[in-house]
Image (spheres, rainbow, N blue to C red):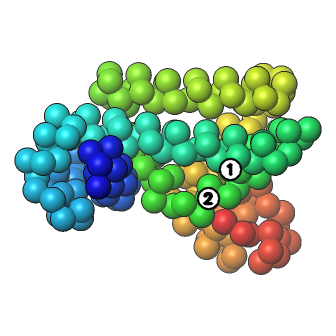
Amino acid sequence: MTGEQRRSVVIDAAIAEFAVYGLYGVSTDAIADRVGVSQPYVIRLFGSKKSLFLEAGRRVFERILAAFEDEVGKDPEDALSAVQRAYVGLLARREELLMLLQFFAACEDDEVRQAVHEGMERLYGYIKERTGADSETIRELFTLAIMRTVSVGAGFSEAARESEWARVLLGLGAESTEEDIRF
């Protein structure tokens, strides 16, 4: 493996660990064990656990943007619908969405907050440029995406099968079918 490939494997392992335990709840030992390398090697690659956390969060933002680009590339004439479809597709990637939530949760740290702002700005800029949507439409899109991200982490889709509160929060009608509750 090249050095860049090893970095990538470690970042993916870090996403899995940080998704569950957050910045402060996981050790670099756990990440190293997941990959089968030594903890000093992980530190040598990234410098610190926080630097690795930042890379993991940035990787998730990059993957979200890549999913948007792929879907818009298939349907450039209806870019807004393409972005919406892309995000629904991302809902199956629970681990990455949990990492995104952990990234948001760690924003008391200035560097993390700056990285989150940069990631959100890139997504916003892409959507604004490619869709031509107005500010209110973009705000609604982000609001729904964040609610759906939280819903994946908290298991709202499972609760929606039986509970009205979950169906309402997910924007589903009281008479929603199993097909309506897909994520």
Question: Could you tell me residue 179's position as x and y percent?
Answer: 80, 74
**Res. 159 visible in picture:** yes
Q: Secondary structure at mark 1?
A: helix
Question: For the residues marked 1 and 2, what is the alpha-carbon distance in whole angstroms?
Answer: 7 Å
Q: Is residue 155 left or right of residue 134?
A: left
> Residue at horizontal 51%, vertical 61%?
94
Image quadrant in which you'd find residue 37: bottom left
Quadrant of the image containing the C terminus? bottom right
Question: Could you tell me residue 182's position as x and y percent?
Answer: 72, 69
Image quadrant in which you'd find residue 56: top left
Q: Is residue 137 left or right of residue 69?
A: right
Q: Where 3 falls versus 94 (above or below)?
A: above
Kindly identify which residue carries mark 1: 87
Image quadrant in which you'd find residue 64: top right
**Res. 22 visible in picture:** no
> Residue at horizontal 68%, vertical 70%?
160
